[in-house]
Image (tube, rainbow, N blue to C red):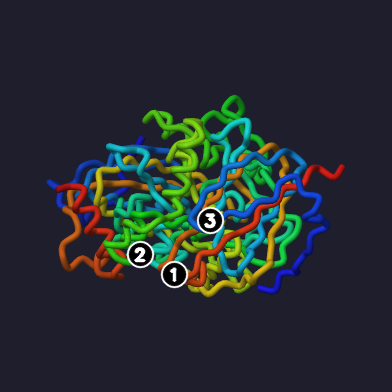
Amino acid sequence: MSAALVESRFDPRAALYDEVLPAGEGWLHEIKLGQTFRIEDLRGNQAVDTLFYSAADPGERYSAQDTIRAQERIYLTTGSRLLSNEGTALLTIVADTCGRHDTLGGACAAESNSVRYDLDKKYMHSCRDTFLRTIVARDALMTKRDIAANINFFMNVPVTPDGGLSFANGVSAPGKYVEMRAEMDVVCLISNCPQLNNPCNAYNPTPVRLLIWGNPE
Amino acid sequence: MKLVHNTVQDVAKDALLWEDCVPGGAHWSGIARRGTTLRMIDVAGGANCSAIFFNRDEKLERYNMADTLKAQHTARLTRGHVCYSDMGRVLCSITADSVGWHDPLCGPSDAATTRAKYGEKTYQDARNDMLRNGRDGLLIELAKWGLGKRDLAATVNFFSKVWVDEAGDMRFVLGHSQAGALVELRFEMDCLVALTAAPHPLDPRPHYAPGAVGIAAWRSGTARPDDECRLSCPENGRGFHNTELYYR
């Protein structure tokens, strides 16, 4: 896929929020209507497992199936509208220097690791453990029931015309980023993926940088 | 009303549990116990059946699209594949399939896109020929079991084919499923099943004419050691192991 790469118009020095999230850690943060949110892949080929919720109603959340069906394309890049399970845009991707992000691979979990790799892999750290620890620490508004199929920013999961699917080597690189504008007040939940058993992180989970800018208008 | 469509002539009468027919656009839910096989039949051709599965005893455990696809390295479902829960267990196995490709990507239709494509047809105007959409049908069924929209995650569209080209664009295949086409799900866990026979959301046909789906269930037993679905990849062997541990 030869997506046109679109660069940002924002200056990191003007960001309202600018933090580094190490691999294996979770992040829960509100992004207000009109604000712009960037995820930067600092060292390259890091999978960033990401979910979005309406801040007003956590029962309204990012829906992979609604999103890919509406754009009739399985990958995300500039112009993709991230739709909720109510068919409403949560955010729109406005800049992307990577070019392709995954909607189908979901999050690793202790239990799925035991299936995919080996029974004894279930005690390794996983994205779902991070998601659960992050939402439980915050409050009881969200539970396991609210964890649905997530976006994997910077992850490469190609699907072939005959219906094959694989976790392929990454297409990202150090300094690549994706940026999205909030179309409503949203809550973002991230697990910076700790997976060591497949090439989604190039077998080396690394930190990412998260930035938020205010509404320029 | 005729409910029996000769969907199970080949099933022993003493094993048959029940049969039914879900009219096009309508929705259904029920329990499929471990060791039960559920057959779905595309009665007239061109049907779509969007379905989701839950562990009957702990409904926080549900069908997981991503885990199903990545464990089996597939973006389609057919005989030999299984449907995984988010807990690394096999909810059900696809043990027979005359269609060859079922769509796990697109999910059910919804009210807005159904209205945009087909216009308005309310109950007041059309009685039970009103336009029903997949998502609302599934939400009605889930509500009967105390579940709601937070529980409605990705579904499988049985009888529908959507393939993905090199650019990632999704292509719906018209005329994929023929009259009498069938798929069978052998349940490896006690499951709540919810399904809708509303049209596939990418079906380009301009008129609302969803096909009926015949359903029938019988006692089949669970996967044997040499089962095709268990052996189709090493991941499934471990998935069955996890499932069998749960029922010890």
Q: Which mark sits nearer the N-terminus, 3 or 2? A: 2
On what subunit does the disc labeled 3 rest? A
Say which amino acid is labelled 1: Asn
Subunit under mark 1: A
In the image, A149 versus B15, the foreground residue is A149
**Front label number (1 vs 3):** 3
Q: Which mark is residue A188?
A: none
Packing grade of label 2 (10 A; few <14, some 14-19, many >=20) is many
Residue bearing the label numbered 1:
A198
Q: Residue at x 61, y 51 (%)?
A: A67
Estimate the x, y position of residue B35 in percent, counting from the top left. 19, 50
Looking at marks 1 and 2 on the same chain, the residue that comes earlier in the sequence is marked by: 2
How many discs appear?
3
Amino acid on which the number 3 mark rests in the picture: Asn
* Crowd class of label 3 (few under 14; some 14 to 19; many from 20; radius 10 Å): many
Q: Nearer the viewer, residue A20 or A69?
A: A20
